[in-house]
């Protein structure tokens, strides 16, 4: 992988927009704010951008964002893998940089989901709209299942096979809240206990309200360029060491062969192999935490513990600062910000950790970070391995 | 910002004034390759695809066998299944489901092999468990389609 002639892709700038509540912003204005800040962070200007990667809920989405931003990119990508999209988009951007077909790729995300759709998201499943589900999506759409319900089905099966407990799931939310306490922008910062998570309302057994991510407005962006170009830029470059993505099913959870295994089990080993590192080399992780069970499955599937041991891993502080795998050091989607497709935030926080800019939750001497997105109904997974040093 | 920003934060919707007729279950618009599946359930039968070459059963209906690519034919299934996983839905703001809360959504493994999503009915939601034996029971949802619900065997 590390042929000496190879052009290397780096992340040269990162930023989030304001969050978590942006009632006066359009979705595109969130993109613009995050993108401007990421370019400023990189020491680049709009005129330097020749690539744009973003995705949303409309076809030709990237084209629309390019128009709004006044860009005329010759590389664009809007691969939509739900919450995993932005890890895929950064991986693709790295390939484009390494292939020499783009010089500066702006990857942006923006959402005003909280202001526009509010709190029904995730529990408005089914109803009359179910019958309108496109093509094969109809088969799982007739039963009144919800987004939360899909993850609840995975949690229940994991509990059945491995003895995972509601307390262990709750401990994920507790740790994320501990991290969020250090993030002044986080949507929720007051500490919670396992007991408080378990006494919050059941939304879909066995998942409680506090097992679910928050719903936010917000966006984030990063700038991917070549190591050569970054050499003249102000920030320490962060190398894209490797990436991979996978999918197990789309909207039909019935089409997933094993609910205790997520697509991370495919994307993780591939990404580590491409990066030339192992899970033991990882100093800090940013793992998609749509629900507490999502994190338990991901730490197992990425190989940070054995299959079935995710419950004890998180319960014993594996995700906490000072633990085996400090995770979601900004407070994650469970406490800080979850505007719908959080993947871009994972990359931003991973880069900040590798630059030593993560403030109170900085992991000492972090050299290798993983950002892993999970999208749909555990349908997609995308792993990015990032490093402080050239491979 | 208290109270916003998480599914469970939803408060009950205000009551709709006046009488509302019960809203029926959503009905599928059958695609050509699935017409037989929905029609059979309308007639009180559960059918699955069986590969003419390798004998594997599959749902949902596809054009070819997912295992070997062989042609498939419809065969009648036993209607027996076991619960692979389940959840009790306690919050859903879409009708008709909100009127049924709490109710059970489950994935069940048919004795023939295929896994389907369904509702477990005919028992207390708290009585459902992983591995529980269940059997199909049918409900018409349109002129051309029925669905298979499952109840304790
Ligand atoms: Zn076959």
Image (tube, rainbow, N blue to C red):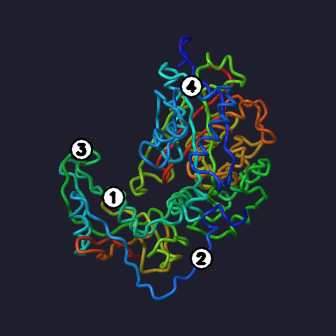
Q: Which tag, 2 or 1, sits closer to the chain's start? A: 2
Q: Earlier in the sequence, mark 2 or mark 3?
A: 2
Mark 3 Cβ inside 8 Å of ligand 1: yes
Q: Looking at the image, do the residues carrying marks 2 and 1 touch, with CB atoms under 8 Å apart? A: no
Mark 1 vs mark 4: give the one in front: 4
Q: Is mark 1 within 8 Å of ligand 1?
A: no
Name the residue nearer the viewer: A294 or B145.
Answer: B145
Disc number for residue A104: 4
Which residue is label 2 attached to? B12
User: Could you tell me which secondary element the residue under label 1 belongs to?
Assistant: loop
**Disc 2/disc 3 C-alpha distance (Å):** 49 Å
Mark 1 to mark 4 CA distance (whole Å): 48 Å
Q: Are marks 2 and 3 in contact (CB under 8 Å)?
A: no
Can you say whether A389 is above or below A112 in the image?
above
Label 3, secondary structure: give it. Answer: loop
In the rendered view, tell whether residue B34 sits above or below residue A57.
Answer: below
Residue topped by disc 3: B69
Q: Which label sits in the foreground, 4 or 3?
A: 4
Of residue A381 and residue A111, the one placed in the foreground of this image is A111
CA gap between label 2 and label 1 equals 37 Å
Asked if both marks, 4 and 3, belong to the same chain, the answer given is no
């Amino acid at each position: 992988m590390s042929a000496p002639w190879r052009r290397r892709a780096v992340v040269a700038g990162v930023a989030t927009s304001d969050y978590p509540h942006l009632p006066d912003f359009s979705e595109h204005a969130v993109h613009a704010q995050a993108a401007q800040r990421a370019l400023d962070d990189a020491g680049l200007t709009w005129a330097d951008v020749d690539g744009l990667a973003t995705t949303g809920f409309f076809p030709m989405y990237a084209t629309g964002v390019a128009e709004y931003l006044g860009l005329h990119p010759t590389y664009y990508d809007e691969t939509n893998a739900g919450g995993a999209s932005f890890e895929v988009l950064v991986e693709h951007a790295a390939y484009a940089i390494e292939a020499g077909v783009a010089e500066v790729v702006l990857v942006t995300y923006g959402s005003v989901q909280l202001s526009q759709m509010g709190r029904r998201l995730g529990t408005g499943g089914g109803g009359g709209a179910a019958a309108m589900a496109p093509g094969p999506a109809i088969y799982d759409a007739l039963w009144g299942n919800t987004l939360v319900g899909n993850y609840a089905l995975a949690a229940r099966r994991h509990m059945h096979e491995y003895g995972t407990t509601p307390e262990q799931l709750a401990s994920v939310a507790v740790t994320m809240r501990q991290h969020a306490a250090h993030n002044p922008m986080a949507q929720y910062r007051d500490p919670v206990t396992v007991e408080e998570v378990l006494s919050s309302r059941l939304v879909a057994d066995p998942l409680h309200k506090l097992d679910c991510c928050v719903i936010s407005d917000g966006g984030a962006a990063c700038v991917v360029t070549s190591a050569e170009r970054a050499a003249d830029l102000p920030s320490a470059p962060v190398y894209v060491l490797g990436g991979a993505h996978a999918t197990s099913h789309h909207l039909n959870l019935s089409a997933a062969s094993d609910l205790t295994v997520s697509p991370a089990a495919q994307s993780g080993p591939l990404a580590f192999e491409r990066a030339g590192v192992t899970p033991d080399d990882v100093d800090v992780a940013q793992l998609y935490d749509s629900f507490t069970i999502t994190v338990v499955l991901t730490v197992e599937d990425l190989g940070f513990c054995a299959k079935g041991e995710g419950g004890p891993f998180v319960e014993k502080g594996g995700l906490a600062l000072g633990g085996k795998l400090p995770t979601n050091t900004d407070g994650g989607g469970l406490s800080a910000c979850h505007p719908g497709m959080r993947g871009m935030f994972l990359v931003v926080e991973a880069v900040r950790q590798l630059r030593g800019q993560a403030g109170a939750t900085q992991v000492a001497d972090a050299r290798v970070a993983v950002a892993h997105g999970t999208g749909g109904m555990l349908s997609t997974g995308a792993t990015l391995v990032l490093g402080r040093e050239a491979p | 910002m208290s109270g916003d920003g998480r599914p469970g934060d939803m408060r009950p919707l205000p009551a709709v004034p006046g009488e509302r007729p019960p809203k029926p279950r959503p009905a599928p618009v059958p695609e050509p390759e699935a017409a037989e599946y929905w029609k059979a359930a309308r007639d009180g039968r559960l059918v699955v695809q069986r590969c003419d070459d390798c004998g594997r059963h599959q749902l949902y209906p596809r054009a070819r066998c997912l295992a070997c690519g062989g042609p498939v034919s419809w065969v009648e299934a036993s209607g027996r299944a076991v619960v692979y996983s389940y959840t009790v839905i306690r919050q859903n703001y879409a009708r008709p489901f909100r009127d049924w809360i709490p109710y059970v959504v489950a994935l069940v493994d048919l004795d023939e092999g295929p896994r389907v999503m369904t509702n477990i009915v005919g028992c207390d939601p708290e009585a459902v468990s992983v591995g529980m034996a269940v059997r199909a029971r049918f409900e018409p949802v349109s002129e051309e389609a029925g669905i298979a619900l499952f109840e304790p065997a």
